[in-house]
Image: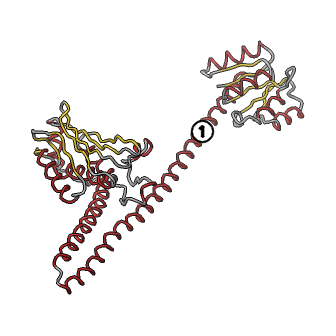
Amino acid sequence: MILIVDDSPENIISLKRVLEKNDFEVDTASSGEEALKKILKKSYVLIILDVQMPGMDGFEVAEAISGYSRARETAIIFLSAASANVNLITKGYSSGGLDYISKPVDMNILLLKVKTFYRIYEQSRALNQMQDALREEIEFRKEAERKKDEFISIASHELKTPMTSIKGYIQLLERSLDKHDKETIRTRLRKVQNQVEKLNLLIADLLDISKIESGKLKFNKRYFAFNEVVDHIVEIMQQSNPHVKIIKKGSIECEIFGDEMRLEQVIVNFITNAIKYAPDTDEIHINYHLEDDRIYFSVRDFGIGMSEEHQEKIFDKFYRIEETSERFQGLGIGLYICQEIIDRHHGTIGVKSTLGEGSEFFYYIPLHPSKELINQYQHEF
């Protein structure tokens, strides 16, 4: 927008008419004081400013404008009948003016200068946008680098923990073998097996995240019995965690279409997290059923829960809740992988949680995808 400042109504009318005819948006002020009030409220690309006005003259207005952050980059063209006065011209430039036009105004010259300033303004704005985008990109590289370094550190620690435990149990096993203590050997072998399984899960997650990043996470979708999968998982998880009662509610009698192994991976992740983050409770609830043409599955715990802020970020890659990162181990990629799996099943994943009262992780997936999607899966995989 252009602001014309002149105490002469005739000048304002003629300038405004010419500029609007050439598709410029125009505002006007008949005094320096009025101009300053408008500049405080609006942003202008260009100000056409008469020098000789009663009250505040054009130079005083320009000097005042230079102190406004809103108008600091605004271009000013001075208008004056005193074209031969070199001192006035010099004062105009020193007051912040970028150009000077003598009265009576040659409209062709004025239009040429206005178009030039607008072109410079657009180029400057485009350059600023490029600089902003570049700064954001640099900050995103820096943040990505920080997250990568943090992830490597966490992964190294998480992988080292079960390895250290395995090494310790093997040393204890050697002593038990010397004593021929079969019961102790069995107990310690089970503990080694548990640590190996932890290590296996960590490595599997690392491989999956690499495949997601490279677009190579494969899916083998077919029809299978969902009830059987859930029953099998619950049985195994219950045996591994006898201190927690896993309460299962619901049933899906028909077969569903999807990747059995990947959906099993999501269910195991939900249950494992529920047990991990509810160490002081003795039960978790599993609920699954059909809702119209969708499968609903959820795991509810009664543990530490999380705030709304954390709920919004919990499925982000590498995200770990700082308050729990020291107490609970993890790479911060399990739920990110779960989200990718559910996305690839054209479903939705989410969490409902109350801090201090527990969390419920859930997902919906379509019971029967369209024939087009099935054909697509068969061609892709």
Q: Position of residue 289 (x, y in %)?
A: 18, 37
Count residues near mark 1 (Cα–Cα under 10 Å), then give few for <14, some for 14-19, many for 20+. few
Q: Which residue is mark 1?
A: 123
Which kind of residue does numbered mark 1 sit on?
Gln
Quadrant in which residue 166 is drawn: bottom left
Q: Quadrant of the N terminus?
A: top right
Q: Is residue 102 left or right of residue 369?
A: right
The one of 266 and 82 positioned closer to us in this rendering:
266
Q: Nearer the viewer, residue 141 or 278?
A: 278
**Taking 35 as reference, is 144 left or right?**
left
The residue under the point 18% across, 32% down is: 293
Residue shown at the point (23%, 58%) measured from the top left: 241
Please say if 22 is above or below 279: above
Nearest to the observer: residue 103 or residue 62: 62
Residue 223, above or below 153: above
The residue at 24%/57% (across/down) is 243
Say left or right for 57 vs 340: right
Q: Secondary structure at mark 1?
A: helix
* Residue ranking furthest to the bottom: 178
Which x, y percent locates residue 244?
24, 54
**Image position, residue 177 (x, y; %):** 19, 84
On the image, the x and y values in percent for residue 263 come to: 20, 48
